[in-house]
Amino acid sequence: MRAVKLSSPGTVTFEEVPVPEPGAGEIRVKVAGAGLCHSDLHVLDMGDAWPAFGLTMGHEGAGIVDALGPNATGHKVGDPVIVNVVWSCGNCRACVEGRDNACEVTGGRDSFPTTPGLSCDGAMAEYMIVPVRQALPLGDIDPVGAGPLTDAGLTPMHAINTVKHRLTPGATAVIIGIGGLGHVGLQIVKAISAARVVAIDADEKKLEHAKQLGADFTFAPGPETASKILELTNGYGVDVVLDFVGVQPTVDTAAAVIAPEGLVRLVGLGGGAYPMNADVAAPWGVDVQRSYGGTRADLLEVLALAAAGKIHLDYQTYPLEDFQQAIDDLRAGKLVGRAILVP
């Protein structure tokens, strides 16, 4: 079969590899579509600092069950499934408490839980092997375009669920970065709450997209952006900031507009540092949290919203062999939504 491999630091290659066979408790999925994410660019840009090479890339996958390994129950050949992005054990204290994106067995203080395409073979191939527990039924959702729901849907869903109690009528939420994750996050906030939404992006096309998705206000980043947002709240600040970029200017904007007891979620991997210390934290009571992936319950909620037509993914498809063009287009900011590689 054909597969897209991270073969060496910063190098992606297109290779012929054997079709894998499922083991005990595993299924083989014939991939219908694999999403390409800014996290993939992050891995490429890490060079030799990234610890794992030779893996098939792609942590956003969906497809059709093609074969069952021994003792693989719960699915049958022909079922459409989405592959969970967080492969947790299901049995440790964190998992039992519903915090499976912080699994004690497959992750830890210095590592994220097992994730296809990052720590085992992923979805940018014709087939992938998946533990049966990590494949969730898709129902009537098209598997070609569904893969990014496991990250571009799940990751904002988890971040939003940690701030949901503050998305009350009259609340204001700022969403920074209306790309693959941000355009879904905006839809989720509008679907589950009455909060007004401020969207920030440097790309005018993405700001127009944000308006189409229901943003109440849109701003390009700039020296006056924070003051314009504060004007909307009479200087008090906003309840929630979801930063899907994470570079220093966007983190600084989050700090400049958040209200007392406000909630900041840093989702993007841009490397920005939030300005806070033990002596001075202005305003008081701000809650800042990094966010990784999400839980099984979060993903089920995403799938329910998608099935009900309350959220959708905007995407552009590429043949699997055109992976480099998709990478180049993503890096150049040409995409609205997600790129999906189709085997």
Image (spheres, grey):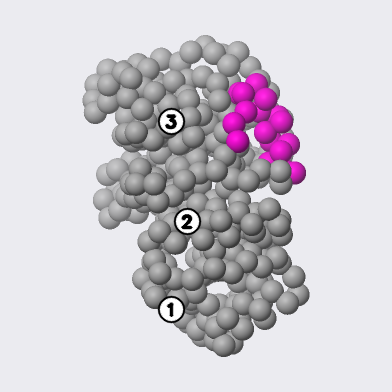
Rounded to the nearest angstrom, the CA distance separating label 2 from label 3 is 20 Å
- The structure residue drawn at horizontal position 58% and vertical position 60%, both measured from the top left corner, is 211
**Mark 3 crowdedness (10 Å alpha carbons): few <14, some 14-19, many ≥20:** many
Q: Nearer the viewer, residue 91 or 343?
A: 343
The part of the chain drawn in magenta is: 316-332
**So how many labels did they put on this image?**
3
**Mark 2 crowdedness (10 Å alpha carbons): few <14, some 14-19, many ≥20:** many
Provide the residue designation for mark 3. 143
Provide the residue designation for mark 1. 170
**Mark 1 crowdedness (10 Å alpha carbons): few <14, some 14-19, many ≥20:** few
Which x, y percent locates residue 81? 37, 31
Q: Label 2 is placed on what type of residue?
A: Gln
Residue 187, numbered circle = 2
Q: Nearer the viewer, residue 231 or 123?
A: 231
Q: Is residue 126 visible?
A: yes
Quarter of the image that includes the C terminus: top right
Quarter of the image that includes the N terminus: top right
